[in-house]
Image (cartoon, rainbow, N blue to C red):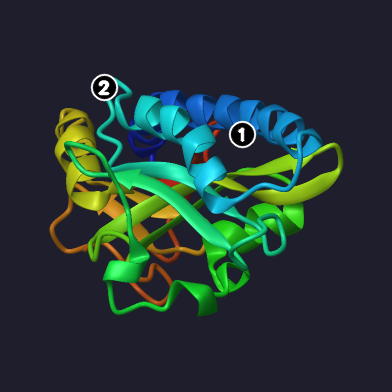
Amino acid sequence: MTTATDASTAARAAAIVSQYFSAPIASLEATAALLGTELAVAGDLGPLSSQQLDSLVEPHALATVALPDVHVYGAGFIAAVGLLTDERNHLSWWQGDDPKRLLLAAQSVNKEHIDYSELEWFRVPMETGRGHVAGPYVDYLCSDEYTITIAAPVHIDDTFVGVAGLDLLIDSVERQLLPKLAELGDKVTLVNSVGRVVVSTDPRHATGDAVRGGALADLARTACEGVALEIIAE
């Protein structure tokens, strides 16, 4: 049963979450639009290589990682298959407190055989043409940490050419969001669109826990405007 107090708490918590995510989402959407325009111009000049793509993406990625108020761990662009002349697909990505380009070739992953279309943060924007929030999940590709990835599709005219994305580590999200949610006084849990806990002020609910079948399953959810997340207040 949801009380009036719970509903009020949920509404205030949803507003806090929406405000927290609004800046990185707006920045990413603007970046996706700019990249579409810049890639179209570059394509008019001739076939595009991975090195040329990295040069184009780098200033956008560094600007995203440097966003104030929200700690963005990594950002960049992931090319669709066939966009480049020298690689089947390509991850043009910068991350860290002193951002450096991620070099997958230096890891155990064979980047030529990664199928990004199978990954939620790439697949959903590609299929829907809309931005998407994926996670929390353990990002074995970039950080090896619990992560939220926000991604937006990039198009040249009506042709999908990849996604612009950014990563938020759950550790940073917790440190920035939980104190604000805790000030509301009640137990507040943030869940994603598939019913998994993102963060919670209640220690019984850990990041990644499934809501289905648990204590939160039958409680009302309040949508967070502008981001596909929901609040459950107890």
Q: Nearer the viewer, residue 174 or 162?
A: 162
Q: Position of residue 153 (x, y in %)?
A: 66, 45
What's the residue type where badge 1 is placed? Ala
Asked if 220 appears above or below 81 in the picture, the reply is above
Residue 67, quarter of the rendered image: top left
The number of numbered discs placed on residues in the rendered structure image is 2
- Dividing the picture into quarters, in which one does residue 166 lie? top left
Q: Which mark is residue 69?
A: 2
x then y, percent, for residue 196: 39, 64
User: For numbered disc 1, what is the local secondary structure?
Assistant: helix
Extreme residue toward the top, this view: 68
**Residue at x-position 43% and y-position 34%:** 58
Residue 32: which disc? 1
Residue furthest toward the right?
Answer: 158
Residue depicted at x 39% and y 67%: 211
Nearest the camera: 35 or 166?
Answer: 35
Residues 193 and 4: in front is: 193
**Marker disc for residue 107:** none
Which of the two discs, 2 and 1, sits closer to the camera? Answer: 1
Q: CA distance from mark 2 to mark 1?
A: 21 Å
Image marks 2 and 1: residues in contact by CB distance under 8 Å: no
